[in-house]
Image (cartoon, helix red, strand yellow):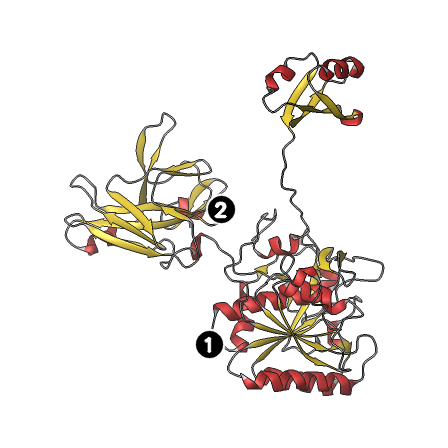
Amino acid sequence: MKTFNIAYSSDISATTLLETLSTHGTVLYHLEGVHVVGLEVEDDFSAETLESVEGVILVELDAETTVTSHAEWHQFRLVTDALPMKQKYNPITEGTNSVVYLMDSGVDDTHPEFNGSNIQHLYSFNGDSSDVAGHGTLVASVINGQTVGVSKNAVIKSVKIPFGLATTGQLLTAFNAVLEDHLVTSNVVKVVNCSWSVPKSALLDSKVTELQNAGLVVVAAAGNTGVAADTLSPVGLNTVIGVGASDAYDRVVSWAMGLSSNYGPEVDITAPGIDVTVASISGDYATSSGTSISAGIVSGVLAQYIEQNPGRDAETLKDMLLEYAAEDMLFRNETIYGTTPNRLVKAVYISSPKIWNHNIFTMFPVNKQEITTLSFTTTTPLATAEYADCQIQSNFFKKLPWVSGSFADGVLTLTVAPTEDVVVGKYTIQITSTDAQDEKYFTQYVLGVYENDPAELESVEIEKYLTVDEDNNTILRVTPAQCYYNADCGKNQVCFGGSCTDT
């Protein structure tokens, strides 16, 4: 048996329609508000029979479908250059074996979100590693949770502190536990996440500085009370990474009465932190807001940077995180946040420039008299890769007939054999590839064809590529009539307003 959803016109009698449909099968439901009837029929029953019934507008098989949740918007934002957001989270790495010390209320690692996550209970101020407050669990979930976490392969070492009222001595002792554990492998950079703040404490700041000098990166929540961050510790220490919160529209706004990100130059970067789905100690999920979540997300992203850049020191990794951030993306009240850097955190994600071992737009000189073999090795897992005709929006790129390619074991091999009639010049080519989720990537390179000496290419200023015109005739294009990317244009040109313009 199968079920059809049948949409009908509001102009006809629903009673008459139901009587007619009942002669073909069993009416399972009638949704009067949207004018839809669910009809169960035999497997061999044709939809065309129902389409001919008077008043029927649409007949559609009631098949199972995947319901996409936008609960992971914070993940999507990390891999999107600018709104609207991608609907896919595809970082190059997921922080494998990178350690994040989570100084918080503990972690409920029995939550289903952590099935497969690596959570170690390093220290507890009272010997109990459970999470009664729930704060540590929600922060942990955005760090290495399996569905809402940004780096599901990172390692969390839980350092439980009193949440609410804590003495400076208790916090110092917890920091010391972190330091002792880190020094066992001091050559490996690790992250300390502090999704909390206390009134400014010189003693606490000095301990944080000690951790930083030992090679740890300290991430601190800016705080949620709309005050200057320099009045707090540890975020007020300008050497830590202070983190503010933004929403799905890149706005830095209040998320409840009296709750908004703190401000000031000590808040180095902003991250998703408003209406984010997190794990709850109830065993379910909840939507939560605050710079605590934002700090956890930044710590998770840092875990990716650590994995991607083995051997880099803590200061360099911190600089890389800030330099790679998206600039001037945040909508905010500049009267309040004008002294706060306008940076939005970004994960390093799979994109065309990072697909292959050669930088995009690299030029490969090839001799017309010879057959040249070029090898491109993938830097990230790909399902397919080919040199073929492709289309990017309105631009059609035709395969050069004297170039062929094959892809195997992560290597794309191009055989370049220019024929005698090929004009000396630079020819732009496109490589199309897909990943395991069938997302496509387009990467451009240049073949520099010379007759006798590569120096001949020095006088060639504009790249060429084969394309097709409106009548489907193959043409050699130099400067496109319409462009979408700077790469569509010739040398010393940029794409501005849909046309190539000289720089």
The residue beneath circle 1 is: 311
Viewer-proximal residue, 262 or 303? 303
- 59 relative position to 286: left or right: left
Look at the image and tell me in which quarter the N terminus lies. Answer: top right
Viewer-proximal residue, 121 or 214? 121
Q: Secondary structure at mark 1?
A: loop
The residue depicted at 31 percent of the width and 33 percent of the height is 475
Disc sitting over residue 35 in the figure = none
The residue depicted at 29 percent of the width and 46 percent of the height is 405
- 496 relative position to 145: left or right: left
The 10 Å Cα crowd at callout 1, few under 14, some 14 to 19, many 20 or more, is few
* Residue 339 seen by the camera: no
How many numbered marks, from 0 up?
2
Question: Which image quarter: residue 238?
Answer: bottom right
Question: Which image quarter: residue 115?
Answer: bottom right
The residue depicted at 39 percent of the width and 27 percent of the height is 470
- Callout 2–callout 1 Cβ contact below 8 Å: no
Viewer-proximal residue, 398 or 379? 379
From mark 2 to mark 1, how far is it between C-alphas?
32 Å
Question: Which image quarter: residue 330?
Answer: bottom right
Of pointers 2 and 1, the one earlier in the residue sequence: 1
The residue beneath circle 2 is: 439
- Which amino acid type corresponds to the residue marked 2 in the rendered image? Glu
